[in-house]
Image: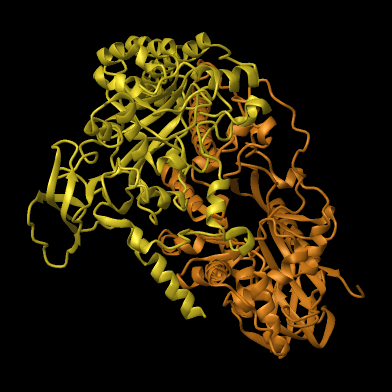
Chain colours: A yellow, B orange
Amino acid sequence: MKKLTLFLLIVAFGWTAQAQEKGSVLIQNATVITITDGDLEDTDVLIRDGIIERIGKDLNAPRGVETIDASGKYVMPGIIDAHSHLNGVDINEPRNPVTAEVTMEESVDPNEVGIYHSLAGGVTSIHLMHGSANVIGGQGETLKLRYGADQEGLKFEDAPRTIKFALGENPTRVHGQGNSIQPRTRMGVEQIIRNHFDEALDYKRKREAYLEAKQGFDRNGRGTPPVPVAKNLRYEILNDIIEGEILVHCHSYRADEILMLVRVFNDYGIENYTFQHANEAFKVAPELAKHGAHTSVFSDWWAYKFEVYYSTAYNASILNANGVINSINSDNDQLQRTLNHEAAKVVRYGNTSVNDALKMITLHPAIQLGIDDRVGSIEEGKDGDVAIWSGHPFDIYSKAEMTFVDGKKYFDLANDADDMRIHIEPGTKFEDGSHMREIVSRREADACLQDAFILFGEQSAQQHN
Amino acid sequence: MKKQILWLALLFLGVSFEAAVAQTTPAHALTNITIHHADGSIDESATLVWRDGVIEAAGSNVNIPFDAFEIDGGDSLHVYPGFIDGFSVWGSPDLPTDLKPVDDPGNPPYDRAGIQPDRRPSVVLQSDKNFETGMKAGFTTAALVPKGYMLPGQVEVFYLSDDLESVELLHEQLAQSGSFEEAPGGWTRGVYPSTLMGVMAKFRQLMFDAEALQQHIKYYSQNPEMPAPDRDPVIESLFPLLNKEVPLYFEVDQKEHIERLLKLKDEFGFDVVIVSGKEAYAKADELKDRNIPVLASIDFTDMPDWYKKQKEAEDSDEEAEEEEVSEEEQAYRDKQMEAWKAEVTNIRKLMDAGVSVGYASAGLELKDLADKLEILLNEGSVSEEEAVQLMTQNTAEILGLGDRLGSLEKGKNASFSVFSKPFSEEKAKVLHSISNGTIHEFNGE
């Protein structure tokens, strides 16, 4: 019995022990969707030690490297979701309108089986975001879906820092209506941002002056020592935003508030930001393009609250046609597994080219997360984060058959065990803990306002994006 | 000169007079007993002599002082070093239940946010029947901490007694305690920090605030012409932790939480002691390398029902009913068993890895202690001798009190328990508990 258990565990999880290792594989005779260099027929992709080493025809597998025949199949870059709450321990720290000091880096649950389910949808990287309860929420964490790795091992190494902002109804309802504090209105949201930036700049001046005076006083001991100014984590992060060290991803819907933030960021010299959801971004597409602002939208999801009624399925296509770097995101664990379908809709609705639509779930989210030098396309020298699809990923009948991160296979449809959980509570009975499908569907779509629904009151508890 | 001699003479007289008084405190001798030492060795037909709360002799060939009050164990009593609870909430005030909403949940008062590092058990301690129940279970000493949230208060060590008045403080301000518990209040009354990441950030900010205030106080003490600091007992109570003068006793179970704790440790450089640590086995090698001790909980998850049934069937010799189990259920059971075994062998794995492991109830109720100990001994691959060592010497050493507590030898504190049988046997009872030399009798109960 003990031996059997051990055996089963080795079969099911043997690979997880080496989860952070890099792998090598030669994928042969596939249609390779490079994203940046068109689709290459009958082409091989050689990944060695986690890096795409060669793309070409009739490549030879180096000694010991597994070969996979992908004749008739497609290889595409791993899908990247620029807006996810897949495996957050907590999503919202909703008790203050500004919580820049908290970070999803410290809220990563590496044991979430949803990671595996997303791998089954060809997803290899996600942007684990703080929720939208606060005007300036917490920092995000870009992850590679190395299922089985620990929280450190899931991190996308050296990915730029990010942070969540949120405009409109969510922060005004949570804080204004919920707690009777600023912001109660959209005007208040703008003022919260400006006030906090100003306070942060003021803090920086004082803190630097203190440190300088302290150094002088401690050195020569003359005069009166300075009154200490404590290091302030929140203001430090806000200053990092102003200094361009953190990419802003802003939850937003209405065109007016989108332009508001563009103006605010212009005033503070902040560049490189992405509007998340941005259902009305199509109205201001030329302005966004002019300012180099990016968007990350749903293909056709709206009307779940008042500010999201004025929406169109042409949003992504209009943004794309205007030269805005746009991605399609999920903000939802289920939708994340079929992001290929979401991108396909952009072709169907707005006649965007197939390759441009594919960019919206690969290269463009990579750009928005500042990781496009590593992932987002199949190019020599980039990371071996790819998926093999049974057919073209925009074909409704296609399935992701294998998913690789750093050249290591994390999902294989042919060896897809029923229960892929890494961690179960020993106190959970079979009756309560065995039905994976039920567990997964019972789980809330871990969306933007998780942990903060209640602050809205009951009526709106279901509205959360 | 004459006067000086007189003074000296008086001085000597005084000293010897005092010494004479001390000598008059009678010794106690417990004879014909079996002594179970912390290291697992056993002295049969042994004698234990103590005076003024200090052990004078323990072993088989012991001279009983002429003035000793002798108690004959009649060769049937088993004496163990007093068990030490390395982290207990006995005597703590209850958590507040009537949480009022606050005007600005983002800036709540410290206590409302669970930030109470200034609280000291020696100040807030309340009557608690657990003190007596604990003694009846073999405990004579406990490191106490108030119930709370992210920073519940300080850890202080006490000799137990059956009434609050005589619970004696042994070591004050031994450590700061902490956990990742967010501020209370739940959905409707919650305040900042209300999440794990919020607690992490708030902890850092408190340390930064303490750093600045300490600097200010220091500057001001030498430069009265500068603006005076705003004194703040809550922040000031973090100075010892900030200055690495006391360790942080952190209640944490999950592997990921241990990793988060070590991150904070690395940022601020204080020593940590892991309290509870149910998944500490997963970090055993790192804990060993970094010399981080664990005051382990034995508050194990109950045995899976199906496993319990199997065990009972095995024990009863009756022909076990063959249970129909689907393949799916069997696979789940295997997984469940693996998880449960990992939990109950935590201490074993930590010891094997060379981690210093002691004992902490960390919220375990005393009524459950015997059952949990049974699991530790029967399923956790820990021997009775190891369990004793864990609860005595090891815990004393982790608390930094190994020089006076945790073993029965000359010069150590006289805190031990007299059991009717070896402590893990069924119906074993504590008949006498000697705590800091004071005898508490539990006969006839």
The percent coordinates of residue A343 (x first, y second) are 33, 34
Identify which residue, B98 or B231, lies in the foreground: B98
Position in image of residue A375 (x %, y %): 24, 41
Residue sitting at 53 percent across and 49 percent down?
A440
Q: Quadrant of residue B422?
A: bottom right
Tell me where residue B1 appears, x and y as whole percent: 67, 52
A80 w.r.t. B60: above or below: above
Instruction: Say if A141 sits above or below B2 in the image.
Output: above
Q: Is residue B197 left or right of residue B300?
A: left
Q: Could one spot residue A145 in this view of the protein?
A: yes
Write down the quadrant of residue A82 in the picture. top left
Q: State the residue lying farthest toward the right.
A: B444
Q: Along the horizontal axis of the image, is B271 left or right of A400? A: right
Q: Residue at x 82, y 56 (%)?
A: B166
Q: Is residue B171 visible?
A: no
Q: Nearer the viewer, residue B156 or A149?
A: A149
Q: Residue at x 53, y 56 (%)?
A: A436
The answer to which image quadrant residue B357 occupies is: bottom right
Q: Is residue A366 shown left or right of residue A454? A: left
Query: Height in image: B286 above or below B197?
Result: below
Image point (28%, 58%), residue name? A21
Left or right: residue A300 compared with residue B113: left
